[in-house]
Image (cartoon, rainbow, N blue to C red):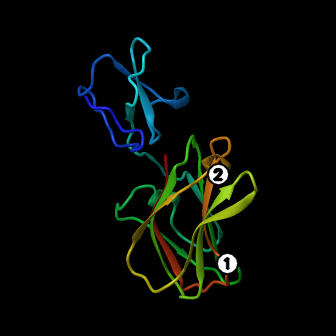
Amino acid sequence: MSMADPSRPKSMKFRGGTTDERMVWIGMAGEPFTDTELYEVFLSDGSTPGGILVSAPLKYLPPDSVEFVKGTSLDTVTTVQVLDDGSYMTVSEASGSPGMDVQFAFTGVKKINGLILRYYYDGSGNHNMWIQIWNYSTSAWTNVISGTGAVATNFHYETIHIPVAANYMSDGNALIRFYHPESGIPSHRLYIDYIALQY
């Protein structure tokens, strides 16, 4: 069994049956071994073999609900909860400003490492489509992606790291929105296949 270099976190992964049977998993702050934070391996006698660090696989939390504050869609939140399953959400812009405000609510949030998306926006090249997360500390939306529209026909992935995650969750809740600040054109559409918090 080799020692992990602390300067290279997340480089080791132990699986059942491949480590010394004396080892037990102890998570940071007593949490179970279920996220991507570093963990230290403790022996059953309480001692710590220095330098052994392990990481857990990523997990994803899809939204529980969606609110179309501005913009129209016939789809429900279930269409964005499973990646690449053949179903997706279509949202049309509304006339007036903002042209779109689609908010996804997450519950049961204990940690946020990042945000993963599979989507595309088919709109004007000079129109903005912002992806934002609600900051509970400042009571304001924070941009995680600021992009403009273009004629697009293919889904693409975005994976965004969320720093200082404690600012973006409260009592197990978190909010993500797609926001089009300019006046909308109803023939312009947003297509979302998947959205999830990474933890």
Q: Earlier in the sequence, mark 1 or mark 2?
A: 2
Category of crowding for the residue at label 1, using alpha-carbon neighbours closer than 10 angstroms: few (below 14), some (14–19), many (at least 20): some
Q: Is residue 161 left or right of residue 50?
A: right
Q: CA distance from mark 1 to mark 2?
A: 22 Å
Q: Residue at x 42, y 16 (%)?
A: 47
Q: Nearer the viewer, mark 1 or mark 2?
A: 2
Which amino acid type is marked by label 2? Tyr
Q: Residue at x 60, y 86 (%)?
A: 185
Q: Are marks 1 and 2 in contact (CB under 8 Å)?
A: no
Residue 24: x and y, percent?
38, 21
Q: Residue at x 32, y 37 (%)?
A: 13
Residue 123: x and y, percent?
52, 84
Category of crowding for the residue at label 2, using alpha-carbon neighbours closer than 10 angstroms: few (below 14), some (14–19), many (at least 20): many
Q: Residue at x 39, y 34 (%)?
A: 53
Q: Secondary structure at mark 2?
A: helix
Q: Which residue is mark 2?
A: 168
Which amino acid type is marked by label 1? Pro
> As drawn, which residue projects farthest toward the top?
45
Q: Secondary structure at mark 1?
A: loop
- Quadrant for the N terminus in the image: top left
Q: Is residue 147 above or below residue 131?
A: below
Seen from the viewer's position, the closer of residues 116 and 183 is 116
Residue 97: x and y, percent?
71, 81
Q: Which residue is mark 1?
A: 181
- Label of residue 69 in the image: none
Seen from the viewer's position, the closer of residues 83 and 36 is 36
Q: Is residue 7 above or below residue 120?
A: above
